[in-house]
C-alpha cells in the first residue's frame, strides 16, 4: 500500500507545482479582493413586514414583495460567494506553504542521500584498507 502512495507522490510534477504555487496564491488573493470589493455586502438584510391588510395584494405590491425576496436571496448568495473566495484564498496559502515545505524536504532528502552514500563509500574504503593491511 505504501508503494502505491509512493508512486502517486513521485508522479506529481513537483517542479510545476512549486513554480505555480505563488501564481495560485496571488490569483486567490486577487479573487478575494475583487469579490469583497464588488459584493459590498450588507449583512443586515431588510426584512419586509407582512401586511395586515386582508385584501389580496395588487400586482405592484406582489412585484415589490418578489423584489424584496430576491434582494434578500441575492445578499445571501453574495455572503456565500465571499465565504467561498475566502476559503479558496486560505487553501491557496496553505498549498503554497505545503509546496515550500515539500521543497525543503526534497533538498534535505538529497543531502541525506549524498551523506549516506559518502558514508558508505568511506566505510567501504576503510574496510578495504583494513582488509588490505591485515593481509599484507
Image: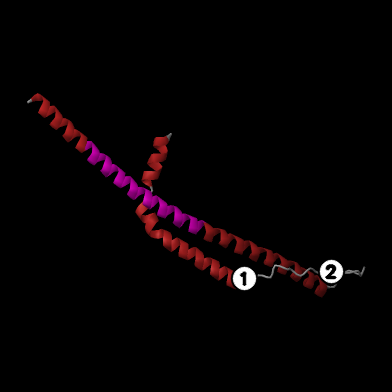
> Which residue ends up furthest to the bottom in the rendered image?
60
Residue 64 image offset from top left, x and y in percent: 78, 73
Q: Is residue 55 magenta?
A: no
What residue range appears in magenta? 91-120
Position of 50 compared to 12: left or right?
right
Residue 11 image offset from top left, x and y in percent: 37, 45
> Which residue ends up furthest to the left in the rendered image?
136
58 vs 73, nearest the viewer: 73
Q: Secondary structure at mark 2?
A: loop
Can you identify the residue that label 1 sits on? 39
Q: Which residue is painted at 57% across and 68% down in the image?
A: 35
User: Label 1 vs label 2: CA separation?
Assistant: 25 Å
Residue 63 image offset from top left, x and y in percent: 78, 72
Q: Which residue is painted at 57% across and 61% down in the image?
A: 86
Count neighbours of disc 2 (C-alpha within 10 A) and say few if under 14, some if 14 to 19, many if 20 or more.
Answer: few
The secondary structure that dominates the magenta segment is: helix
On-image quarter of the N terminus: top left
Can you identify the residue that label 2 sits on? 49
Please tell me which of labels 1 and 2 falls first in the chain.
1
Dividing the picture into quadrants, the one containing residue 22 is: bottom left
Position of 76 compared to 116: left or right?
right
94 vs 57, nearest the viewer: 94
17 vs 76, nearest the viewer: 17
Q: Is residue 97 magenta?
A: yes
Q: Which residue is painted at 70% across and 65% down in the image?
A: 73
Dividing the picture into quadrants, the one containing residue 77 is: bottom right
Amino acid at each position: 500500500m505504501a508503494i502505491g502512495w509512493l508512486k502517486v507522490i513521485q508522479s506529481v510534477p513537483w517542479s510545476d507545482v512549486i513554480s505555480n504555487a505563488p501564481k495560485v496564491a496571488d490569483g486567490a488573493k486577487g479573487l478575494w479582493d475583487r469579490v469583497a470589493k464588488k459584493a459590498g455586502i450588507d449583512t443586515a438584510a431588510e426584512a419586509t413586514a407582512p401586511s395586515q391588510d386582508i385584501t389580496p395584494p395588487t400586482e405592484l405590491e406582489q412585484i415589490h414583495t418578489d423584489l424584496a425576496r430576491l434582494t434578500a436571496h441575492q445578499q445571501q448568495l453574495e455572503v456565500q460567494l465571499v465565504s467561498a473566495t475566502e476559503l479558496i484564498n486560505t487553501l491557496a496559502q496553505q498549498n503554497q506553504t505545503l509546496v515550500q515545505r515539500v521543497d525543503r524536504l526534497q533538498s534535505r532528502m538529497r543531502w541525506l542521500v549524498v551523506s549516506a552514500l559518502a558514508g558508505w563509500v568511506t566505510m567501504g574504503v576503510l574496510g578495504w584498507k583494513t582488509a588490505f593491511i591485515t593481509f599484507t
